[in-house]
Amino acid sequence: MPVEYANKSNFKEKIATGTIILDFYADWCAPCRMIGPVLEQIAEEVKDIRVVKVNVDENIELANEFGVRGIPALYVLKEGKTVAQKAGFMPKDALIEWAKNA
C-alpha cells in the first residue's frame, strides 16, 4: 500500500484503525527527505503497518495537537491511539521493529 497523506479534514479517518507510523515532516527538512524513502519501502513491503504523513507547514494545527517540536517526528498509533513517539531518522528494520513492538 502506498504512503498516505493526511490533513485536518481526513486525519481522524486515516488514523482510526490498524497500526500506523505517523510522520510529521516538511519538504525543506533534510532528515525528513532521508527517511521518506524508508517510509515508502515500509508502506509497500509491510502489510500490517500503514504509513501516514502530515506536512507540518500545511497542517500546523495537527502538529500542535501532537506537540511536534522537531521533525521528522514519528509516532506509532494503534487503533487511533498514540503508543510511542520518536524524533529523527531511523533505519528501516529499526522502524519496523519499533512500530510492531510499541
Image (spheres, grey):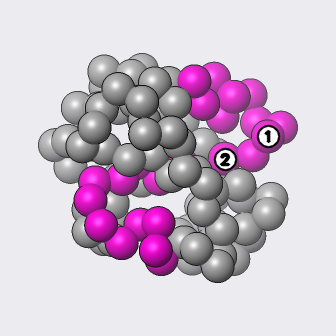
Q: Mark 1 is on which residue type?
A: Asp
- The image's mark for residue 45 is none
Q: Going 36% across and 53% down the picture, which residue do you hit? A: 20
- Residue 27 is covered by the magenta coloring: yes
For the record, the magenta segment spans 12-37
- The residue that mark 2 highlights is 25
47 sits to left or right of 14: left
Secondary structure beneath dot 1 equals loop
- The Cα atoms of the two marked residues, 2 and 1, are separated by 7 Å
Placement of the N terminus among the 4 image quadrants:
top left
**2 lies above or below 81:** above
When asked about the image quadrant of residue 46, the answer is: top left
Total numbered circles:
2
Q: Are marks 2 and 1 in contact (CB under 8 Å)?
A: yes
45 sits to left or right of 89: left
Q: Mark 2 is on which residue type?
A: Tyr
Please provide percent x and percent y for residue 57: 80, 59
Please provide percent x and percent y for residue 84: 31, 55
68 sits to left or right of 61: left
**40 lies above or below 57:** above
Q: Going 24% across and 43% down the picture, which residue do you hit? A: 48
Secondary structure beneath dot 2 equals strand
Q: Going 31% across and 44% down the picture, which residue do you hit? A: 49
- Residue 15 is covered by the magenta coloring: yes
> Farthest left residue?
101
- The image's mark for residue 27 is 1
Can the viewer see residue 64?
no
Please provide percent x and percent y for residue 93: 31, 21
Please provide percent x and percent y for residue 71: 64, 46
Can the viewer see residue 68?
yes
